[in-house]
Image (spheres, helix red, strand yellow):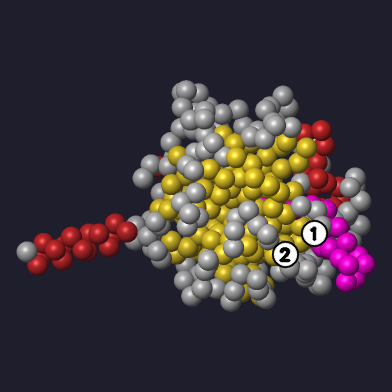
Amino acid sequence: MKIILSLFIILFIQARSQDLDLGSRVKPLPAANRFAVKDYFVWCGAPVKGPDGKYHLFYSRWPVKAGFAPGWALRSEIAYAVSNTVTGPYKHVNVALPPRGTNPATGKKYWDADVTHNANAFFHNGKYHLYYMGEYGDGKTYPMHRNHQRIGVAIAENPAGPWKRIDAPIVDITDDKKSFDSLCVTNPAACVRPDGGVVLVYKAVQYIEGKEMGGNVRYGVAVADKPEGPYIKKPGHIFEAEKPGKHWMVAEDPFIWFSKTYGNRYYAVTRDVVGTFTGSSGGICLFQSEDGLNWKPAANPKVLESRFALDDGTLSNSNIERPALLIENGEPTYLFGATDGYKKGGKISSNVQIPLIP
């Protein structure tokens, strides 16, 4: 009996430490699994299951009349919706991070005065932590807004707020103009380390003299002992192709988490911009890391192709961007993502919830 029990334990541990094959678990998207808001583009979508058993969704939105692009960079705000079930219906509650204008202490605009975007969230030690990109500008000039992008975190005990925002970015640009993150930093993704600290990966653009929009888009890592920081940048950049090419961007929109279930390592899902890692331009790929600092494509990197399956037997007309996972009891259960919006004649963008096989 003891031998059988020991073998069972060994097999259980082996099963729990296996490589994650997320792509094999993707199911077709039911038509009902979609969150949309009338007269608004909906983008991003950071799901958190709260201790209340409800599903809280933080998302970016901006008026349809502003146009998809550059409307997102000029008018976006992070809002909050809630549902009793993971697939909805989600009900809009309020705007979590509205424009906040001028800092009365300085008489100047806050670093996130006009726009909040790129929601990423988790619940930790009794509080909700909402990471985001913030920026400011004149409300009409795209490069001005884009180049002011910085990264912050807001903290609240209740997902409906009030949120405590920090007066300075937690991740700012690097002063050295030769650095890959010397023009702007954006697109944060954070998770709690086993020791209680935080790993944060971020998108960045290098300052290039004479080029208003700068150089290539790359990703870096910063770490902190607690969610509010201070954050320390680590050298180098991540999510790179094995053989560097000429593409200005190869990965985008990461979501990261630490998994005790699958190898006691970090994982990330990202958009595969040109098909470098999955062979599908615009698909979703899986990365893994032993320490949160050094990343490589997972053993099974392909999660989604650029078009994904619908439950009526057809394929979507557009790809998934801003992927995020709902993790329950150590298992990814749903893949959230933004879709439509870019394609000419497409629907107004919305957030979908793609089920994963348990």
Q: Nearer the viewer, residue 129 or 249?
A: 129
Q: Residue furthest left?
A: 1
Name the image quarter holding residue 254. Answer: bottom right
Residue at 68% over, 39% down: 42
Q: Residue at x 80, y 53 (%)?
A: 99
Q: Residues within 10 Å of mark 1 (few under 14, many from 20)?
A: many
Tell me where the magenta segment starts and ends, as one range.
Answer: 101-118
Q: Nearer the viewer, residue 106 or 162?
A: 162
Q: Please state the horizontal and vertical placement of residue 9, each as a whole percent of the image.
A: 21, 63
Label 1 sits on residue: 112
SS for dot 1: loop
The image shows residue 56 at horizontal and vertical percentages of 56, 49
- Is 343 one of the magenta-colored residues? no
Within 10 angstroms of label 2, few (less than 14), some, or many (20 or more) residues? some
- Residue 83 in percent (x, y) is at 53, 43
Mark 2 lies on residue? 165
Q: Classify mark 2: helix, strand or loop.
A: strand
Q: Quick check: 353 above or below 212?
A: above
Closer to the observer: label 1 or label 2? Answer: 2
Would you say the residues marked 1 and 2 are in contact, meaning their CB atoms lie under 8 Å apart?
Answer: yes
Residue at the location (89% across, 47% down)?
A: 139
Real-space CA distance between mark 1 and mark 2, rounded to the nearest whole angstrom = 10 Å
Residue occupying image coordinates x 29% and y 57%: 15
Answer whether residue 111 is magenta in the image.
yes
Quadrant of the snapshot with the N terminus: bottom left
Number of numbered callouts drawn = 2
Question: Would residue 255 be found to the left or right of residue 30 on screen?
Answer: right
